[in-house]
Image: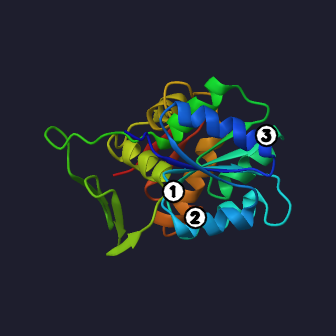
């Protein structure tokens, strides 16, 4: 049984070959593309659960490709980059990536990032709420849809998981590490820049005034709190 369908996008044929072999052995179905243009074409032709996307390519680069895909899809995206500066990482996340991995990377690290990007926190309809309402915001935990003033707000998988976790723990400051491990998995905890970017994106989507948020409040030096 397939673990999921992955599109590998990189202009280096050796890297594509290594990643394809690594992922196929783990039970994933894998297709590849050697440019942003080819990636967009393959993406339009097929359905994928995850895209591994090189940040630096000739023509349409990874950032532009990521933005284009994200404009119409919530598919999981992990950016591959040779640059390790916080600015570049934030740029990747801000473009819509769920995660990034810096080259050169080890096989265990790549597989961990893939699992984290595909990770979904299961609902428990028997013991937990099926929906959460706060003012004019409604979070449907069963359909994974968010409604604001009657309109559907499209979130990426990680944005939804982050909002879901905060909303299930209302009015309580949730520390950065706890949020990271709840949404991305136990291997995470120090990547505070992830939260800054994703919280900013969420605020742009659900807050009337993102600079003066009503729902997602910052707890200085601690984390974030969902206000109900």
Indicate whether 153 appears above or below 130: below
> Do we see residue 222 in this rendering?
no
| Whole-number angstrom distance, CA of label 3 to CA of label 2 | 22 Å
Of label 3 and label 2, which has the lower sequence position? 3
Residue picked out by circle 3: 14
| Residue 141: image location, x then y, percent | 28, 52
| Residue 85: image location, x then y, percent | 82, 40
Of label 3 and label 1, which has the lower sequence position? 3
Q: Secondary structure at mark 1?
A: loop
Residue picked out by circle 2: 43
CB within 8 Å, label 1 to label 2: yes
Of label 1 and label 2, which has the lower sequence position? 2
Indicate whether 34 appears above or below 26: below
On the rendered structure, is 23 left or right of 215? right
Residue picked out by circle 1: 75
Q: Secondary structure at mark 3?
A: helix
Residue at coordinates 48% horizontally, 42% vertically from top-left? 118
């Amino acid at each position: 049984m397939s673990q999921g369908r992955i599109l590998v996008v990189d202009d280096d044929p050796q890297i594509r070959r290594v990643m394809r072999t690594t992922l196929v052995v783990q039970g994933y179905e894998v297709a590849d593309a050697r440019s942003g243009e080819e990636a967009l074409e393959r993406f339009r032709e097929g359905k994928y659960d995850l895209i591994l996307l090189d940040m630096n390519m000739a023509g349409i680069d990874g950032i532009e490709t990521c933005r284009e895909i994200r404009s119409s899809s919530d598919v999981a995206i992990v950016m591959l980059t040779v640059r390790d500066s916080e600015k570049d990482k934030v740029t990747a996340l801000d473009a819509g990536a769920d995660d990034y991995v810096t080259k050169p990377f080890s096989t265990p690290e790549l597989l961990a990032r893939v699992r984290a990007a595909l990770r979904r926190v299961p609902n428990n309809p028997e013991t937990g709420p099926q929906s959460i309402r706060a003012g004019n915001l409604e979070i449907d935990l069963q359909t994974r849809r968010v409604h604001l003033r009657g309109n559907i707000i499209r979130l990426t998988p990680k944005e939804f998981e982050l909002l879901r976790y905060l909303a299930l723990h209302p009015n309580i400051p949730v520390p950065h590490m706890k949020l990271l491990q709840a949404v991305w998995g136990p291997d995470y905890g120090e990547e505070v820049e992830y939260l800054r970017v994703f919280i900013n994106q969420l605020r742009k989507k659900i807050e009337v005034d993102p600079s003066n948020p009503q729902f997602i409040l910052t707890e200085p030096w601690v984390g974030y709190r969902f206000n109900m």
